[in-house]
Image: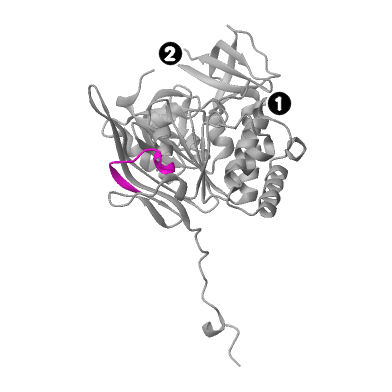
Amino acid sequence: MPSPLDPSTFEPAVPAARPATTLRARNLHLQFPTDRGALQVLAGLDFGLHDGEIGCLLGESGCGKTTALRAIAGFARPQAGQIEIAGRTVCSPETWVEPEARGVGVVFQDYALFPHLNVTRNVAFGLRASAPGERDTRVAEMLELVGLADAASRFPHELSGGQQQRVALARALAPAPGVLLLDEPFSNLDPDLRERLALELRDILKRCRTTALLVTHDQYEAFALADSVGVMEAGRIAQWDTPYRLYHRPETRAVADFVGLGAFVPGQMVQRDGLASVVIELGALPIHLRTDQAMAGAHAGVSGQVTVLLRPDDVVHDDESPVRADVVRKSFRGASFLYTLRLPSGTTLLSLVPSHHNHAVGEQIGIRFAAEHVVTFPIENSGD
């Protein structure tokens, strides 16, 4: 009988299998002819989504995000690069698969519901090749999934915007697409509905285990819905990451500026007793994490000067703090105030403060820095 410590009694650890990649875009380049020459819209777009993952292309108008969605759907053909869906190449210089053969569902910005068809017939539209019994069962499943079983006989004009969006989603999901594409799906809804519906949509997609790609310019929609977000700039992805890391660990100042509110303040790198810190007007900020230290050292260069990103939740209201700032603007957000604060040097900061701390414009309050990490950028990129 082998000893309990005999290595032969142990099975080698089997690494967890990584989910297969359902959608892969490789180095996509796409340009359109114009009167002034070729307009480059996609310039090396590259990303992937695993099975059941929800991704988002986030960016300002004109960054190429909608064109990327159209290329994946098959409505626009890139001049270079490759698109794979469920392991099959659907677009390359040598290969082109028509949109209807890609196994892709699309929810359009305006929902594109048929006004003369009721909810049931709208959802059943993509199931025309199915047997009647199977089609009816699938439609019922989809309407139950999106919470519209009681609205089956109603017409689009009898529904609210949120209900129309759910019908469009049910219709796109009914054929069980390999990938679901969503083009600004909440843009026609009231702002107070968007985040709630984004969370509901996420729940639906996760229950269906559907791989989905959203495009939007609204970071709150992106953060509420997506597992991974790619911030797009000039036809390429500047950073592909989780929403948390995009907000707290932006890799460039442009990404930091686009994702979330914040202020950029000058700082000076110092080394004391083996600990790296950056000194700003609020005081010395110790840099505990090695990754932050390496980034700050690379950004500081010979001069030791850096720009520090301070998010509103990094600047904490503290009546006991010796550091004081003037309230120059305030925005009531229900549970909190967003204060714009001015330091003695004239530098402005943002601070998110619980709304029971109701200070008047012109009042001076105490503040301190409170964050687990310090995000820095090169000083030459600073300036508001």
The residue pinned by badge 2 equals 345
Residue drawn at (32%, 25%) of the image: 381
Element type at mark 2? loop
Q: Is residue 72 magenta?
A: yes
Up the image or down, 340 lies above or below 17; here it is above
* For residue 55, side relative to residue 158 (left or right): left
Up the image or down, 247 lies above or below 72; here it is above
The magenta span reads: 71-82
Question: Residue 119 or 216: which is nearer the viewer?
Answer: 119
Q: Is residue 224 magenta?
A: no
Few, some or many C-alpha atoms within 10 Å of disc 1 (few <14, some 14-19, many ≥20)?
few
Type of amino acid at the residue the image marks with label 2: Ser
* For residue 183, side relative to residue 209 (left or right): left
Residue drawn at (70%, 42%) of the image: 143
Element type at mark 1? helix
Up the image or down, 290 lies above or below 356; here it is below
Residue 342 at what x, y percent from top left?
Answer: 50, 13
Evaluate whether residue 367 shows in this view.
yes
Evaluate whether residue 273 shows in this view.
no
Residue 276 at what x, y percent from top left?
Answer: 40, 38
Residue drawn at (58%, 51%) of the image: 129
* For residue 232, side relative to residue 17 (left or right): left
Question: Residue 64 or 152: which is nearer the viewer?
Answer: 152
Type of amino acid at the residue the image marks with label 1: Glu
Residue 68 at what x, y percent from top left?
Answer: 40, 38
Residue 272 at what x, y percent from top left?
Answer: 40, 37
The residue pinned by badge 1 equals 158
